[in-house]
Image (cartoon, rainbow, N blue to C red):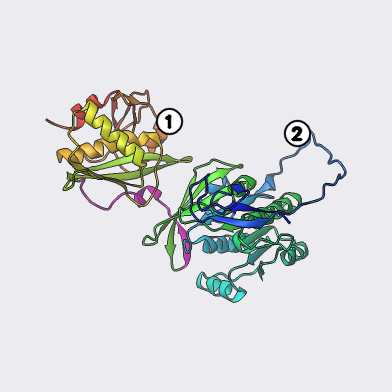
Amino acid sequence: MKSQFVCQECGAFFPKWMGRCSECGSWNSLLEENIEKKKPHRGTPTAATQISAIEIHEDSRMSSGIGELDRVLGGGIVQGSLILVGGDPGIGKSTLLLQMAHHVALKGKKVLYVSAEESPLQIKLRASRLKIGGEGIFLVSETSLEKIMPTIEKEKPDVLIMDSIQTISTEALSAAPGSVSQVREVTSVLMDLAKNRGIATFIVGHVTKSGTLAGPKVLEHMVDTVLYFEGDGTSVYRILRSVKNRFGSTNEVGLFHMASLGLLEVDNPSEMFLSSASGFEPGTVVFPSIEGTRPLLVEIQSLVSTTNFASPRRMALGVDYNKLVLAVAILEKKRHLFLQNQDIYVNAVGGIQIGEPALTLPMMVSIASSLLDQPLPKKMIIVGEVGLLGEVRNVPQIEKRLMEAKRLGYERAMVPKSKVKVEGMRIDEVSHVDQVFSILFTK
């Protein structure tokens, strides 16, 4: 029997072992697997259906009972969908799915929870801590796919939860559980089951040290939706982010608060990312971000201090490091600010990760405010993308950002030139960073 070597980080195949994967650069990640040969066979043709003849039923979606989860899923759980949930150990994946199972079961639906890592007693203890009775939720503790499939056929659940995909294996392959071929084969079987039987299937995935989902990259291509659970182990807040969704918006976020009774929804998410300080200090800017379809007010903080080393340090927390370097270069070239002997630290409060281009102007203003030791006006937000020539470019959904700011009591905004007007809010329109500095900073 022939064998091949598969990278456990990126899923690349190689004919011989190497110490370092040439695709992703990871060390000691190649694992030998046997090549399973399948005999080709010709089956009966599958009938094609005209797209106009397909009917969309009102009950094609069902609510999970958790508003933030419904938001991330695009409005609810789609029947026959395959959803992958990833995140660090202990972040709350199993807790969220158990709470969802409880709400779904209360609506008369049947939920089958397959745990390959915990015993039914352990899940029962968690359910008791979360005040979940468990009526309508059926538990199975098994790692063999050949034993799980008959149980699914017998119970015929409306929602299936597989926790986790890396610990479930099939006897059809000789590879070890969690290997690339095992994960791919088990997911393929679950995908066929979900599509043919109309069972909404949630599978829990482990993550690697770099924070990406373990297993082959094709795993994310096979499923309909990929959800990442983010959060700092020292914080009580959790962010559920959709990075792929065939039934809704991508990059949508759901916000939760970890409490003794499990994950609770955050009623006012913008307050989560704003500090409780009564007055603004130099280096503080409020930025109206758009995450999916939701506007969020995020506080950007910068600290600029003289370095004690030959090379100044640049640190970005929650913001893209390359955008930080770009902002510093524009400030030095276009505003002639001397930052070559300054350490610069930029942080997005609340642990959120922001990647949209509209963050450039708020980050530049925050750095300049800290360097010049001049605070910004209170109750003010700043948004805009800055080009390499110092021009301030327009950004999408300006009106939605301003309305969220007004709802939280902000009275002034600095935005790129646009025709958007918000009653009761002073709007400063700018087209270049020179205008920004002439409005905000005194000489």
Name the kind of residue labelled 1 in the image.
Pro
Q: Is residue 411 above or below residue 66?
A: above
- Is residue 289 in the magenta section? no
Q: Which residues are magenta?
A: 261-280
Who is closer to the viewer here, 27 or 351? Answer: 27
Q: Is residue 210 above or below residue 111?
A: above
Residue 339 point in image, percent of width and height: 19, 37
Residue 276 point in image, percent of width and height: 27, 53
Let me know if residue 376 appears in the view. no
Q: Residue sitting at 60 percent across and 52 percent down? A: 6
Horizontally, residue 333 falls left or right of residue 148, namely left
Q: How many marks?
A: 2
Residue where numbered disc 1 is placed: 396
Give the quadrant of the C terminus.
top left
Residue 207 point in image, percent of width and height: 51, 56
Who is closer to the viewer here, 438 or 342? Answer: 342
Measured in 3D between alpha carbons, the distance from the residue under mark 1 to the one under mark 2, in whole angstroms, is 34 Å
Q: Residue sitting at 15 percent across and 41 percent down? A: 373
Occupied quadrant, residue 234: bottom left
Name the kind of residue labelled 2 in the image.
Ile
Let me know if residue 239 appears in the view. yes
Residue 354 is labelled as: none
Q: Secondary structure beneath disc 2?
A: helix
Horizontally, residue 321 falls left or right of residue 29, namely left
Residue where numbered disc 2 is placed: 51
Q: If you read the primary sequence from the N terminus, does the residue marked by circle 1 or circle 2 appear first?
A: 2
Horizontally, residue 338 falls left or right of residue 87, namely left
The extreme left residue here reads: 443
Label the magenta part by its dominant secondary structure: loop
Residue 68 point in image, percent of width and height: 50, 51
Q: Secondary structure beneath disc 1?
A: loop
